[in-house]
Amino acid sequence: MPLTLLITMLLGFAFSISIAISIGGSAILGLALFDSGKLILVPKEMFSAIDKFPLAAIPFFILAGNLMETGGISRRLVNFAKSLVGGVQGGLPMTCVLTCMIFAAVSGSSVATTFAIGAILIPALVKHGYPAGYAASLQATSAELGVVIPPSIPMILFGVAAEVSIGELFIAGVVPGLLIGGVLMLFVHLWCRFKGLGKNDGDGRLPVGRATLEAGWALLMPVIILGGIYGGVFTPTEASVVAVFYALLVGLGIHRELGFKDLMPVLRKSVISSAVIMFIIANAGLFAFLITRAGIPDAIGLWLKDVLQSPLWFLLGVNAALFVIGMFIETSAAIIVLAPILVPVAVHFGVDPVHFGMIMVVNLAMGMITPPFGVNLFAAATVARISLDRMIAHLLPFVLVIIGCLAVITYFPSVSLTLRDIVFDKAPAVAPIGPAPAIGPQ
């Protein structure tokens, strides 16, 4: 059955069948061919995969992001970011990165970030002389921070799948997110200086004080959400509900750019996005159940332990595999399927599961900006109204920058774990470099 599952799933991918249908269909076909009496397990396992309280945060964070976009919060965040960095050469691309970092601290979704921020900044970048392909590629890459900087939907999924504290994952994502954002800002600044672009990016920039005042309510939102989580006031799932009510309060009552007539389209868009993710999770849960029953995770774990004899080579091999997998499988599905398989092996090699979660999330997030199935690429191309091929040449340098940051995050666990250790009062983590610990009875 395992070979049938794999071949059927790969055929589904090859014929451009949706990820969820390919995964779920392969699992149902495997059961029908080899053990049709257990087809009753299909609805049970699909329901069990989504019957987890932390997953309730996903639709609420998506709704919060859509409310922020419609209620004028996104535009105020753009003006605030531009007031800080827009005055230097290349300030507009830097504004794009910085705005996505701030927006990511609430939305938790890279696609929501792409639409909300890209609708404002991609036309502005093109107006200032940047190629449309570059503007769309930059937006798609910057929006990736939406799943690295907490709160993050993929982190919630990893925490559920690998039974790791979501609060620890969130706090561990702060420094990696800042690292990637900072390096991206430095890179676009140097690129603009080299290309001679962005000399007039400061045109129309608001004074810092005025922009801060106008964006005050928007800037308070991540403070309330993240402060409430880390202060123990509410859980990450409860924080998603707080984010929705705060976005409603600001959009309806303070900025008054969100009307009651806008609520139904926002709700409809949020429901569709949430349903897509939940359907993927349900099908991936069924697939994961079957491959676990077939003993595939144990077999892969033993093979990795035999072939990759040290943590250094294990992390290198896993990163290479995840990079390729991320190109073809949606991030949420990949995490749900792979986390239960890889985390036990990582623990055997002495890798902290929270640190490994950061590696998986950052690596698989690159799948959102790499062909052929990069969802951020399609979203950015839609906003920019250009074809995907016009983005590829501009995209490669950004991917290399993310890979460089991933290498730092991988081999310097303190980047992810120092803040976690301080907040949760844990013993300092040891770098996962050196021979693997002995496995099994001594």
Image (cartoon, rainbow, N blue to C red):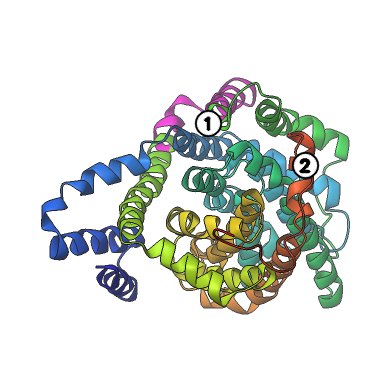
Q: Position of residue 172 (x, y in %)?
A: 70, 45
Q: Residues within 10 Å of mark 2 (few under 14, many from 20)?
A: few
In the rendered structure, which amino acid carries the disc numbered 1? Thr
Residue drawn at 59 percent across, 60 percent down: 442
Vertical position of residue 423 compared to residue 108: above or below: above
Q: Please name the amino acid that badge 2 sits on.
A: Ala
Residue linked to disc 2: 427
Q: Is residue 290 left or right of residue 389?
A: left
Label 1, on which residue? 237
Could you tell me if residue 387 is visible in this image? no
Residue 29, x across and y down, in percent: 19, 63
Q: Nearer the viewer, mark 2 or mark 1?
A: 2
Quadrant where the N terminus is found in the figure: bottom left
Quarter of the image for residue 222 reads: top right
* Most common SS among magenta residues: helix
Task: Specify whether 191 is left or right of 132.
Answer: right
Q: Nearest the camera: 251 or 301? A: 301
Q: Nearer the viewer, residue 252 or 25?
A: 25
